[in-house]
Image (cartoon, helix red, strand yellow):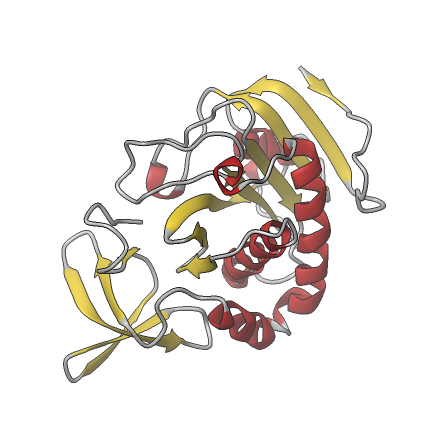
């Protein structure tokens, strides 16, 4: 059952908050709200999820004490351009966690946050259709964010960590308040897509592995090369031999991070 929780300290004015003790998925709840006519902006969070998921349909561990949340948001831009919110959100997570005093932060393309080469968060952005599934002239998105606070899985292909393992204890709602404020700032910088070049530059300044070796796993190919940059649309540019390739989707890992590495 949804409860409209009293806002934690620092909660941005005019922003909704829906708190659930247990839910299937905060992204699914955001989509349900959109289908019922809700427009946001609002954050949905849950103490636990029974069907949390990450990119490419992967399950997302939902241990109590971690943050599971979704932002129901109108990007006010064409839906294809809303993919840029992946970088906006990644920077927001970085800002929120950096504000806790944690060192060793880096962003892994496209939107994971690492602490000393171990993954502490993930992001999943989906469309949120309006009533009856009809497309809207002002489409909504469900921006799902998971941050490991008190627990991290130990059976993942990419090393994982949690904030408490780095000396930070914080409640999920207090961390969400920091994330919500950071997202407002980064969304203003992005400015409906007009400021993506600034977002791209800030992301690159915090990125893991720029100028170094990188491996991209596609569904039918493994590419090894040098991580050159992001293009103007956020695609990863990799130099493989004499060829400069652009990658719009794939699993990233770095040779020195772990033998288990995969996104």
Residue drawn at x 19%, y 49% as measured from the top left: 259
Residue 51: x, y in percent? Answer: 44, 24
Q: Is residue 132 visible?
A: no
> Quarter of the image holding residue 212?
bottom left
Residue 56: x, y in percent? Answer: 34, 42
Residue drawn at x 21%, y 45% as measured from the top left: 260
> Quarter of the image holding residue 192?
bottom right
Residue 178: x, y in percent? Answer: 70, 46
The answer to whether 20 appears left or right of 110 in the picture is right
Residue drawn at x 67%, y 60% as measured from the top left: 187
- In the picture shown, does residue 191 fall above or below 39? below
Q: Nearer the viewer, residue 258 or 73?
A: 258
- Give the number of marks: 0
Outermost residue toward the right in this view: 13
Q: Quadrant of the N terminus?
A: top right
Outermost residue toward the bottom in this view: 242
Outermost residue toward the front in this view: 167
The answer to whether 24 appears left or right of 69 in the picture is left
The answer to whether 240 appears left or right of 154 in the picture is left
Q: Nearer the viewer, residue 158 or 126?
A: 158
- In the picture shown, does residue 72 fall above or below 240? above
Residue 132: x, y in percent? Answer: 59, 33
């Amino acid at each position: 059952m949804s409860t409209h929780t009293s806002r934690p300290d620092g909660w941005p004015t005019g922003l909704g908050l829906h708190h659930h003790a247990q839910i299937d998925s905060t992204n699914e709840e955001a989509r349900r709200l959109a289908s019922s006519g809700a427009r946001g902006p609002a954050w949905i969070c849950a103490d636990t999820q029974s069907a949390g998921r990450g990119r490419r349909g992967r399950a997302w561990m939902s241990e109590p004490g971690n943050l599971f949340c979704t932002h129901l948001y109108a990007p006010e831009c064409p839906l294809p351009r809303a993919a840029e919110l992946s970088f906006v959100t990644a920077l927001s997570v970085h800002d929120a966690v950096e504000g806790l005093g944690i060192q060793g932060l880096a962003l892994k393309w496209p939107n994971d946050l690492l602490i000393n080469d171990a993954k502490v968060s993930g992001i999943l952005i989906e469309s949120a259709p309006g009533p009856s599934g009809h497309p809207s002239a002002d489409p909504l998105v469900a921006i799902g964010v998971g941050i490991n606070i008190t627990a991290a899985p130990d059976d993942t292909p990419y090393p994982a960590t949690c904030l408490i393992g780095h000396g930070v204890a914080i409640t999920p709602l207090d961390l969400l308040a920091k994330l919500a404020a950071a997202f407002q700032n980064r969304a203003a910088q992005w400015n409906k897509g007009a400021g993506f070049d600034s977002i791209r530059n800030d992301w690159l300044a915090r990125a893991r592995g720029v100028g170094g070796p990188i491996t991209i796993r596609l569904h039918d190919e493994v590419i090894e090369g040098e991580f050159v940059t992001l293009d103007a649309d956020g695609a990863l540019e990799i130099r493989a031999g004499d060829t400069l390739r652009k990658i719009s989707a794939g699993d990233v890992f770095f040779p020195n991070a772990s033998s288990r590495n995969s996104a």
